[in-house]
Image: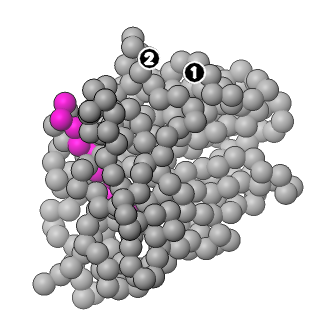
Amino acid sequence: MFRYFLFFLIFFASNKLKATHLIGGEMNYSFTGGDVYDISLSVYRDCYLGQAEYDVPAYILVYDGEGAYLGYFSVDGEPEVRLPVEIDDECYTAPLNVCVEKKLYNLSVNLPANVSGYYLSYQRCCRNNSILNIYDDVVNSVVASGMNLFTFIPPLEQLENNNPVFNEYPPVAICVNKPFYFDHSATDSDGDSLVYKLCTPTDALTDVRPIYYPNQNNQDPIPFKEVRWRNPYSLNNMLGGTAPLKIDSKTGILTALPITIGQFVVGVCVDEYRSGEYIAQTRRD
């Protein structure tokens, strides 16, 4: 009899939209010259607990570096692909019906040089209420906890930058009561120094308006809100147990000894430095 738990799966559910089952992602950008950036948004969906449509189009919101909302870009995205479910232990087998899909949204955008840079954000509600390590938010008596995938582009007047890209997608399932090891490192095409750390994932939107609507401008403001950890979980112990999840700040190696079967929200951040100066942070939810 196998034992397993789902890792990094940030399930979405909504009373309004039935079950959405989006499970996290990240956003990347590369500078191509002029004022043009290529943007890549990866969104993961659970197709094990239920099916739901991806956002088509998806809206990528734009703020300046001071937090003022400027507008949005829309993109339809590529066809989704199913990810392999692999557990690196011959004694354990993941259930055959565990299913995770990835949808990639690529677009080129024009962002005129400014003095404060830009935040780009993809916002969506809601996470599944079966997640063990965070609380649902209660907003105007509506239960909801959403997800915000965002990145910061520093002012072009200061430097031209490409943010780091994680080398591997997170494992879909790992074993309980077995030491966990995963290389969560990233590659930076500029050769910047990278420092890894765990970070609290961010929340977004509500059940009432679970998707950004251009005609209503229901976007979340900056600073973006964070999810709330459920006791006894915390930033320092996201999965529970006596051997907490940790990440090596230099290598990006994740380690833990998970003891609980369940679904968990985890955030990983990488800070980018050039010539000793902090540039920006890239996040994976």
Q: Between disc 2 and disc 1, whose residue precedes? A: 1
Q: Residues within 10 Å of mark 2 (few under 14, many from 20)?
A: few
Q: Three-letter amino acid code at disc 2?
A: Asn
Q: Residues within 10 Å of mark 1 (few under 14, many from 20)?
A: some
Q: Three-letter amino acid code at disc 1?
A: Tyr
Question: Looking at the image, which residue is at 28% across and 75% down?
Answer: 260
Disc 1, SS: strand
Question: Looking at the image, which residue is at 21% across and 79% down?
Answer: 3
Q: Position of residue 138 (x, y in %)?
A: 32, 39
Task: List the residue tagged with mark 2.
Answer: 217
Task: Name the main secondary structure of what is drawn in magenta.
Answer: loop
143 is higher (above) or lower (below) than 102: above
Q: Position of residue 107 (x, y in %)?
A: 51, 30
Task: List the residue tagged with mark 1.
Answer: 69
Q: Position of residue 256 (x, y in %)?
A: 45, 78
Q: Position of residue 121 (x, y in %)?
A: 51, 34
Side of 155 where 285 appears, left or right: left
Picture quadrant of residue 162 = top right
Picture quadrant of residue 64 = top right
Question: Looking at the image, which residue is at 78% across and 32% down?
Answer: 156
194 is higher (above) or lower (below) than 180: above
Magenta segment boundaries in residue numbering: 8-16
Question: Does the magenta run of residues contain 9?
Answer: yes
Q: Quadrant of the N terminus?
A: bottom left
Discs 2, 1 touching: Cβ within 8 Å? yes
Question: Does the magenta run of residues contain 12?
Answer: yes
Q: How far is the residue under mark 2 from the one under mark 1? A: 9 Å
Extreme residue toward the bottom, this view: 91
Can residue 187 be seen here? The reply is yes
Disc 2, SS: loop
